[in-house]
Amino acid sequence: MHQLTLAEIARGLADKKFSSEELTKVLLARIAQLDPQLNSFISVTEDLALQQAKAADVRRANGESGALLGAPIAHKDLFCTLGIRTSCGSKMLDNFKAPYDATVVAKLAAAGTVTLGKTNMDEFAMGSANESSYYGAVKNPWNLEHVPGGSSGGSAAAVAARLLPAATGTDTGGSIRQPAALTNLTGLKPTYGRVSRWGMIAYASSLDQGGPLARTAEDCAILLQGMAGFDPQDSTSIDEPVPDYSASLNGSLQGLRIGVPKEYFSAGLDPRIAELIHNSVKELEKLGAVVKEISLPNMQHAIPAYYVIAPAEASSNLSRFDGVRFGYRCEDPKDLTDLYKRSRGEGFGPEVQRRIMVGAYALSAGYYDAYYLKAQKIRRLIKNDFMAAFNEVDIILGPTTPNPAWKLGAKNSDPVAAYLEDVYTITANLAGLPGLSMPAGFVDGLPVGVQLLAPYFQEGRLLNVAHQYQLNTDWHTRTPTGF
């Protein structure tokens, strides 16, 4: 039962082959048995899950239907969930129980999903390896000595290990797509504004976007359908109709124009990954796609621009965690200044402190124009490059990551080396574009992903291409040994 995809679960529930309660009990048992190896969950919500599963079975018995009705999922632990710890992977929020549901949580609950728990993540979503969590590193089920990617590494590891069929994640600079690539999953970052950020604890407000992690493009379409839509509570939410993502999966790729940027194939890319990307291009050409080389000339500036903008927004967003209103508070402060300093110094881990310091510096008097303003101008140039490219092609294809998953701890002493792992993903966040990573093969037994980017609100096109690719390849069906 644990090998079933979301789509197969929907069919099984509809055909009364099993109940949501039966399925939920099987998966909760797997989490109890296998997660100690992975550390992919921060909280397991067994009582809530069984209550929601029973309610879903009653709704189905009363004639209701729906692809998500009775489907078990988990939420990345930065989506607020009523009465349940929402920690953001941080000591700062270890004791915080959210007083309300995030819009994404509420929408999926209304659709009938069953919440198995809250997944581990890099602290405040800051990281590419899921090693900065207060609750310890998450292990990659393909090799327990390697990282699963971050910051949505808990969601990715749990789905890859078949502890559940799908999970939510968030993507600020690749935090859905990069762990999807490193754990052999399909992961989708929607267009900025497509999925509500209300109740999603912010890292960098102009970059963050929630999205689905699953084994197949078909499952991502199902989960995105439940997540997407306008939310008047979120001032960055866009009032754009949500199409039927599943309906567009079977469209022909005949004549689809695919652009492959020459900048992607630089010295920093593992040549074995480059070969797998070229193989995926050939597969899509067999399905009727037309491929041409394109250029994204300002891509080289993306990492420095991102690592000014994201920390600047983080330093502002995280100023609310001050030991006064909620979250961690130091013991016996001498005065208000001591309360602020020690609560933040003790509550935040080193990576979060590093990014707050960088962001505060970039926004400080005398440096704003030199750093933050310049980074925003580069951001516009990167967006313009994409707009020019999409006049020539329908989607852009390339690697998701320059390397396969690295060993735990390998980059801890060199933060910049870890930052460089985001080189292919951060441009989509800077431009607000939708992006998808799908399985494309293995290097040394570790998964590799291929990334697809599309114009604004063309998530359906990405899912269509990925689904057609997955109908003709079997990379996404591979399961890690022992799971």
Image (cartoon, rainbow, N blue to C red):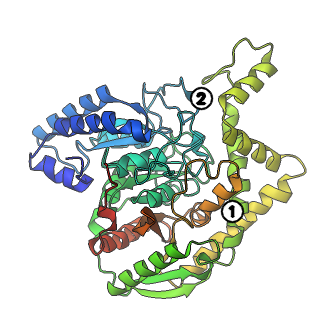
Q: Which of 104 and 86 lies nearest the eye of the viewer?
A: 86
- As shown in the figure, which amino acid type bears the numbered disc 2? Lys
> Is residue 46 visible to the viewer in this orientation of the structure?
yes
Q: Which of 402 and 246 lies nearest the eye of the viewer?
A: 402
Q: In the image, which disc is placed on residue 91?
A: 2
User: Residue 455, image x and y in percent?
Assistant: 50, 71
Distance, label 1 to label 2, CA atoms, is 28 Å
Side (left or right) of 306 relative to 179: right
Label 1: few (<14), some or many (≥20) within 10 Å?
Answer: many
x 65%, y 76%: residue: 267
In this picture, is 226 found above or below 435? Answer: above
> Which residue carries the number 1 mark?
303
User: Where is residue 349, by image quadrant?
Assistant: top right
User: Where is residue 112, by image quadrant?
Assistant: top left
x 50%, y 60%: residue: 191
User: Residue 235, image x and y in percent?
Assistant: 56, 47
Q: Is mark 1 on a helix, strand or loop?
A: helix
- The first of marks 1 and 2 along the sequence is 2
x 60%, y 80%: residue: 388
> Is residue 189 visible to the viewer in this orientation of the structure?
no
User: Residue 217, image x and y in percent?
Assistant: 34, 63
